[in-house]
Amino acid sequence: MAQDQAKRAAAEAALEYVEEDAVVGVGTGSTVDWFIDALADMRNRIRGAVSSSEKSTERLRSHGIDVLDLNSTGRLPLYVDGADEANRFLQLIKGGGGALTREKIVASASDRFVCVADEGKLVDVLGAFPLPVEVIPMARSTVARELVRLGGRPELREGFTTDNGNLILDVYGLSITEPLKLEQSLNNIPGVVTNGIFALRPADLLLLGGESGVRRLTAE
Ligand SMILES: O=C[C@H](O)[C@H](O)[C@H](O)COP(=O)(O)O
């Protein structure tokens, strides 16, 4: 499938940012899966990886890549992750796979965030993709009411529990014209663990796979 090849091309292009002997921050999702597979060829030249999900941990280990605890590594030189949407300021929506909380933690602990995606993910305004919000189970209804007050239509992601034992509300109908402001407002709702807007810590570089190869975008 063309989209799959675009994801793969972007993911493999991120390899050039991996430094010898480094610990690499690794995101989650189908695009990152390609990155992990490519990283396997470098496993003897890196110290290991910090993973953002149980799913990525499993894949890293299956390739013989050491998975390290962020508490023991300190800051990381590089974080590679996908996105559900990206704008030209490299602000993102993430969390389609429900891994947003650990992803945001590892991204914030990294000096450089390289985002890998197919070019269909680039949008003018974030929000066509429903915004994932991770919530503490007992706060599901109170958070949902607050999200409605903010103009969204939250829907519980049925049958899904995050790696942290929480729930995801996917919020439809938001046109996110001020991502920084909305990210901060959502962070202030009691019971919200993390929201999927990555604007306080946007990507530093966006590698977009498409028909004509991989485009490299930095923030405008
Ligand atoms: O929770 C999942 C992550 O934020 C993913 O990075 C995001 O959903 C993009 O996934 P994919 O590479 O499969 O399109």
Image: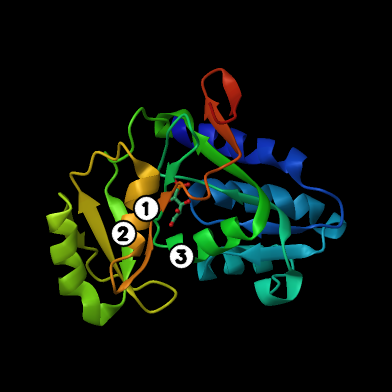
User: Which residue lies under the disc numbered 1?
Assistant: 183
Q: How far, Cα to Cα, is label 3 from label 2?
A: 14 Å
Mark 3 closeness class: few <14, some 14–19, many ≥20 residues within 10 Å = many
User: Which residue lies under the disc numbered 2?
Assistant: 186
Disc 3 element: helix
Quick check: can you spot residue 1? no
The amino acid on which the numbered mark 1 sits, given as a three-letter code, is: Glu
Nearest-to-viewer mark from 1 and 3: 1
Disc 2 element: helix
Mark 2 and 1 residues: CB-CB less than 8 Å, in contact?
Answer: yes
**15 in relation to 21, above or below:** above
Name which residue lies at 82% across and 63% down.
47
Q: How far, Cα to Cα, is label 1 from label 3?
A: 13 Å
Quick check: can you spot residue 42? yes
The residue sitting at the bottom extreme is 138
Q: Position of residue 110 (x, y in %)?
A: 66, 55
Disc 1 element: helix
Looking at the figure, which quarter contains the N terminus? Answer: top left
User: Which residue lies under the disc numbered 3?
Assistant: 101
Q: Position of residue 45 (x, y in %)?
A: 86, 55
Name which residue lies at 32% across and 50% down.
182
Given residues 75 and 12, the one toward you in this image is 75
Q: Sequence-wise, which precedes: disc 3 or disc 2?
A: 3
Q: Quadrant of residue 25?
A: bottom right
Q: Quadrant of residue 64?
A: bottom right
The amino acid on which the numbered mark 3 sits, given as a three-letter code, is: Thr
Given residues 106 and 12, the one toward you in this image is 106
Q: Sequence-wise, which precedes: disc 1 or disc 3?
A: 3
